[in-house]
Amino acid sequence: MEVPILIFWVILGIAILYFGYSDLISLQAGKGVMSFKIMSGLFGGFVAWLLFFSLVFFSKEKWMGWGDVYIGSLVGFVLGWPNILVGLLLSFTIGAIYAIVAVVVGEKNMKSQVPFIPFLAVGTIATVFVYKIFPDINYYFYF
């Protein structure tokens, strides 16, 4: 139930270097701001951070912990905007299905704590595969 913060900073540093390099080699005139991976990642990370921060702050750490805020913002940065919406949807759905099954089977009860970061990881990996299979899925998430 603990997240070493060093893992967060190392992965964030690697992602920033990779996205910065990727944006530099694909730099073209006339591209929109959100087409840059760094900008998309910053916005996606902010959206995820805002969601998880709100859950932690308003529940006084009963619903989620601060590790979820860090890792959620990292996942948002890596997936970018609007991919983070699919990632969060899959993560929360998989987590809810697990919790319901665990309660029905009797492994957990309604007061049990379940770490959310494994579901974030599975949701992130599933999102990468969803975008490989359905590359035009972004069309449904533009407002």
Image (tube, grey):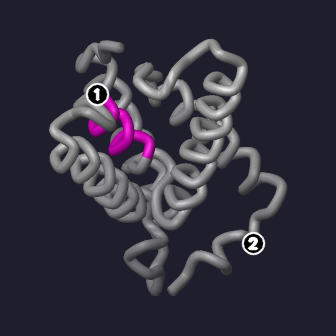
Residue 119 position, x and y percent, is 56, 32
Dominant SS of magenta comes to: helix
Q: Is residue 134 visible?
A: yes
Q: Amino acid at mark 1?
A: Gly
Q: Amino acid at mark 2?
A: Asp
Count residues near mark 2 (Cα–Cα under 10 Å), then give few for <14, some for 14-19, many for 20+: few
Residue 67 position, x and y percent, is 29, 27
Count residues near mark 1 (Cα–Cα under 10 Å), then give few for <14, some for 14-19, many for 20+: many
Q: How many marks?
A: 2
Please report the bounds of the magenta region as a residue range: 67-75
Q: Quadrant of residue 39?
A: bottom left
- Say what secondary structure mark 2 lies in: helix
Q: CA distance from mark 2 to mark 1?
A: 32 Å
Task: First in sequence, mark 2 or 1: give its number.
Answer: 1
Residue 121 position, x and y percent, is 55, 31
In the image as oriented, which residue stretches furthest toward the right? 133
